[in-house]
Image (spheres, rainbow, N blue to C red):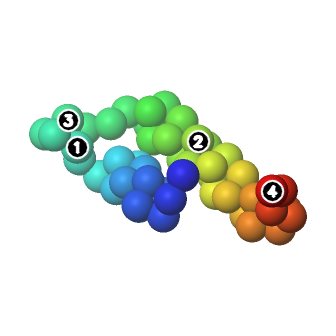
Amino acid sequence: MNRDRLDEEALLVNGRVGGEVLTKQERNTLRREAAELKTKMEEAKHQEIKE
């Protein structure tokens, strides 16, 4: 995943998308998924590259 994906997740979590208002549960789900992705990205940065 890349930084753009996290930015998209933040946009979805923080506001309207396509004229729809997200429910609190949807926003929480997106926040949790974005946090999981961010954690995985940080872990991947510290792993050795296997060739």
Q: Which residue is mark 3?
A: 20
Q: Amino acid at mark 2?
A: Glu
Instruction: Indicate which disc, 4 or 1, sits on the residue closer to the N terminus.
Output: 1
* Quadrant housing residue 19: top left
Alpha carbon distance from label 3 to label 1: 5 Å
Q: Nearer the viewer, mark 4 or mark 1?
A: 4
Instruction: Indicate which disc, 2 or 4, sits on the residue closer to the N terminus.
Output: 2
Q: Position of residue 33 (x, y in %)?
A: 58, 41
Image: 13 above or below 2: above
Q: Which residue is mark 4?
A: 51
Is the residue under label 1 in contact with that under label 3 (CB below 8 Å)? yes
Q: Secondary structure at mark 1?
A: loop
| Number of the label disc, if any, that sits on residue 33 | 2
Q: Nearer the viewer, mark 3 or mark 4?
A: 4
Determine whether, in the image, residue 44 is placed left or right of residue 27. right
Q: Which residue is mark 1?
A: 17
Instruction: Indicate which disc, 3 or 4, sits on the residue closer to the N terminus.
Output: 3
Is the residue under label 2 in contact with that under label 1 (CB below 8 Å)? no
- Can I make out residue 16 in this image? yes
Q: Nearer the viewer, residue 3 or 50?
A: 50
Image: 36 above or below 21: below
Alpha carbon distance from label 1 to label 2: 17 Å
Instruction: Indicate which disc, 2 or 3, sits on the residue closer to the N terminus.
Output: 3
Residue at horizontal 49 percent and vertical 31 percent from the top: 25
Q: Amino acid at mark 3?
A: Glu
Residue at horizontal 35 percent and vertical 48 percent from the top: 12
Q: Nearer the viewer, residue 51 or 30?
A: 51
